[in-house]
Image: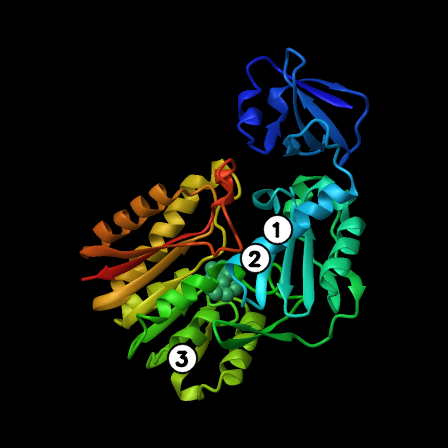
């Protein structure tokens, strides 16, 4: 089965960008079904790549192989999986909670595998990853001997025409949350009903980096989820941390995590509220902090939402700057892939102008080494952040 590209549409494929949109396709030969492996050829018939096909997705095909005589079979995928795991062992040998496979960025479109100690959590976000799910599970069991493998759904699956899923793919995951360690601190992770795969692993390095700026601070951890930044801050001698999140479940888990790490309740507080409203309320009350962490969820999933998202980012950043004491620090993040690092910095600049504060960038944040960015796939870079000194 082959996909023939339109004239002039072969360049991104030659440059190994993994996505082929419907508009680039001249002809589909054979009758490939969602998830089937196809060959990509240029308009002049020249062979380009192996790819997986999905007629139900805007991204019609995703490439992953560039050797014509290596038809992707089980051994091919097993090699990719082993290489991906080996990169983590090389780059972060001590990490107990780590993303082992980061989809396109690891050459395995749509496949996410996160390790939480002896347990694995899998997400299949494309038809190809879905079609190979059982094979992937067999390879994971063989290579890592996990105690369990849990599957989690993601709304992205709907864009690929895939049904909701959730369940156990291997072994018996515990009913209770598991305990993992990150940077020497311990955290409960709910593999079955936590957000995403249970924990925001992409922030591990930033949590460690931020700890260096927490001493004696009265801190606000906005969009706290289960309090991972709060635990790092208190361990680094922050005076007090307020966790702010709209999810009661997340805050319950944050309380358990703070307790697990031995912090007395006098040093922290949980507040269930909408960040946008709460920051406004505090502004009106004149409440102040020394350090504010803003780690909101993804505000944009399509270009059409970009303007609204930019306003959302500006709003919380502007309010946070207003709440900081002179010389306070703002750690501000965006995990929206469509908001570039450049644009994000401009938004934060706009917020600073409106807040009337002199703001300096102290350092840049990005995603951890287990969320690598493949140079041929810059879209894989999604998490960016700034540590700002707010005078
Ligand atoms: N900083 C966290 C991850 C944040 S994920 C960590 O290090 O683990 C984003 C969080 O924002 C989620 O917990 C979600 O419940 C919360 N959230 C989303 N919209 C919100 C809003 N408008 N107000 C408050 N919390 C919100």
Q: Which residue is mark 2?
A: 88
Q: Which mark is residue 235?
A: 3
Q: Earlier in the sequence, mark 2 or mark 3?
A: 2
**Quadrant in the picture for residue 174:** bottom right
Q: Which residue is mark 1?
A: 84
Residue 330 point in image, percent of width and height: 31, 62
Residue 156 point in image, percent of width and height: 63, 46
> Disc 2 and disc 3: Cα gap in Å?
26 Å
Determine whether the beta carbon of the residue marked 3 sits less than 8 angstroms from the nearest atom of ligand 1. no
Camera-side residue of 141 and 256: 141
Can the viewer see residue 192 in this picture?
no
Disc 1 is placed on an element classified as helix
Q: Which mark is residue 223?
A: none
Across the whole image, how many numbered discs are drawn on residues? 3
**Quadrant in the picture for residue 169:** bottom right
Q: Earlier in the sequence, mark 3 or mark 1?
A: 1
Whether label 1 touches label 2, CB < 8 Å: yes
Disc 2 is placed on an element classified as helix
Which residue is found at the position 29% from the left and 76% from the top?
Answer: 217
Camera-side residue of 101 and 224: 101
């Amino acid at each position: 089965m082959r996909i023939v590209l339109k004239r002039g549409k072969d360049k991104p494929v030659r440059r190994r960008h993994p996505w082929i949109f419907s508009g680039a396709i001249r002809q589909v030969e054979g009758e490939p079904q969602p998830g089937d492996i196809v060959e990509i050829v240029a308009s002049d018939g020249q062979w380009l790549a192996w790819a997986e096909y999905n007629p139900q997705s805007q991204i019609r095909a995703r490439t992953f192989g560039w050797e014509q005589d290596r038809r992707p079979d089980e051994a091919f995928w097993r090699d990719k999986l082993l290489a991906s795991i080996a990169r983590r062992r090389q780059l972060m040998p001590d990490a107990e909670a780590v993303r082992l496979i980061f989809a396109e960025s690891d050459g395995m479109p749509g496949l996410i595998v996160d390790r939480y100690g002896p347990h694995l959590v899998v997400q299949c976000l494309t038809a190809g990853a879905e079609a190979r799910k059982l094979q992937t599970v067999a390879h994971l069991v063989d290579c890592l001997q996990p105690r369990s493998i849990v599957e989690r759904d993601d709304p992205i699956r709907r864009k690929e025409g895939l049904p909701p899923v959730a369940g156990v793919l291997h072994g018996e995951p515990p009913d209770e949350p598991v305990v993992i360690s990150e940077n020497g601190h311990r955290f409960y992770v709910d593999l079955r009903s936590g957000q995403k795969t249970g924990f925001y692993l992409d922030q591990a390095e930033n949590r460690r980096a931020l700890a260096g700026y927490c001493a004696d601070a009265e801190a606000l951890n906005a969009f706290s989820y289960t309090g991972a930044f709060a635990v790092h801050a208190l361990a680094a001698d922050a005076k007090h941390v307020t966790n702010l999140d709209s999810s009661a479940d997340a805050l319950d888990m944050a309380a358990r995590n703070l307790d697990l790490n031995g912090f007395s309740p006098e040093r922290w507080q949980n507040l269930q509220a909408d960040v946008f409203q709460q920051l406004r309320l505090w502004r009106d009350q004149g409440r102040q902090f020394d350090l504010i962490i803003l780690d909101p969820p993804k505000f944009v999933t399509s270009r059409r939402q970009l303007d609204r998202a930019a306003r959302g980012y500006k709003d919380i950043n502007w309010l946070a700057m207003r709440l900081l004491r002179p010389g306070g620090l703002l750690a501000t993040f965006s995990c929206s892939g469509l908001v570039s690092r450049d644009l994000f910095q401009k938004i934060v600049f706009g917020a600073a102008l409106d807040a009337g504060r002199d703001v300096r960038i102290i350092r840049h944040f990005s995603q951890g080494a287990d969320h690598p960015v493949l140079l041929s796939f810059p879209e894989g870079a999604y998490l960016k952040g700034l540590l700002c000194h707010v005078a």
